[in-house]
Image (tube, rainbow, N blue to C red):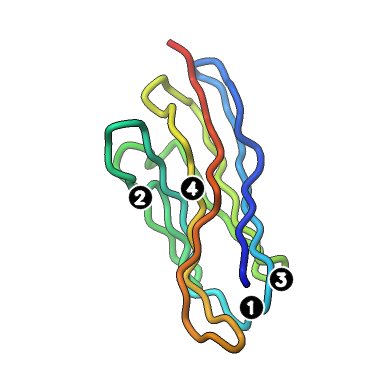
């Protein structure tokens, strides 16, 4: 089965930067979308940034201009460069992929999450 593994989370001071990455592995024929979501306790998971297979990107208003999503299709990876981090960016960040898995067709997959903490 396809798996997504995130890396790069941690603690960073307000105003600092952090880069998180996600690698997809398995019997992948094609990745359609790779995205980053985040969630804090008691709130719904929200979209942070999306990278479409055509190369287009979308960002939540709260992170536009501060965060940059990029992807390496050859390595099936997606990264999120986060600059000017603020305490309300603190959350568990989840990688998401919509892809075509050989033998299963189009599937949606989530990573296990990585914690980003920005203390106030």
Q: Is residue 118 above or below residue 39?
A: above
**Do the CB atoms of the residues marked 4 and 1 lie less than 8 Å apart?**
no
Residue 8 occupies quadrant = top right
Residue drawn at the location 39% of the way across and 46% of the way down: 48
| Numbered disc in front, either 2 or 1 | 1
* Sequence order check, earlier mark of 2 and 4: 2
* Sequence order check, earlier mark of 3 and 4: 3
**Direction front: furthest residue:** 1
Residue drawn at the location 67% of the way across and 79% of the way down: 27
- Residue 55: percent from left, percent from top: 50, 68
**Do the CB atoms of the residues marked 2 and 4 lie less than 8 Å apart?**
no
Distance, label 2 to label 1, CA atoms, is 23 Å
**Do the CB atoms of the residues marked 2 and 3 lie less than 8 Å apart?**
no
Q: Which residue is mark 2?
A: 47
Distance, label 2 to label 3, CA atoms, is 24 Å
Residue 108 occupies quadrant = bottom left
| Mark 2: secondary structure | strand
**Direction right: furthest residue:** 75
Distance, label 2 to label 4, CA atoms, is 9 Å
Distance, label 4 to label 1, CA atoms, is 19 Å
* Sequence order check, earlier mark of 3 and 1: 1
| Mark carried by residue 28 | 1
Residue drawn at the location 28% of the way across and 32% of the way down: 42
Residue 41 occupies quadrant = top left
Which residue occupies the foreground of this view, 58 or 45? 45
Q: Which residue is mark 3?
A: 74
**Do the CB atoms of the residues marked 3 and 1 lie less than 8 Å apart?**
no
- Residue 114: percent from left, percent from top: 56, 39
* Sequence order check, earlier mark of 4 and 1: 1
| Mark carried by residue 94 | 4
Distance, label 3 to label 1, CA atoms, is 11 Å
């Amino acid at each position: 089965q396809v798996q997504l593994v995130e890396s790069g989370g941690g603690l960073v001071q307000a105003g600092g930067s952090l880069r998180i990455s996600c690698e997809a592995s398995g019997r992948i024929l094609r990745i359609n979308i790779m995205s980053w979501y985040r969630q804090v306790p008691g709130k719904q998971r929200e979209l942070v940034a999306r990278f479409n297979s055509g190369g287009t990107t979308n960002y939540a208003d709260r992170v536009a201009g501060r965060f940059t999503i990029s992807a390496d299709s050859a390595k099936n990876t997606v990264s999120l460069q986060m600059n000017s981090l603020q305490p309300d960016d603190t959350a568990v960040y989840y990688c998401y992929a919509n892809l075509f898995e050989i033998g299963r067709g189009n599937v949606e997959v989530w990573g296990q999450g990585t914690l980003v903490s920005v203390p106030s």
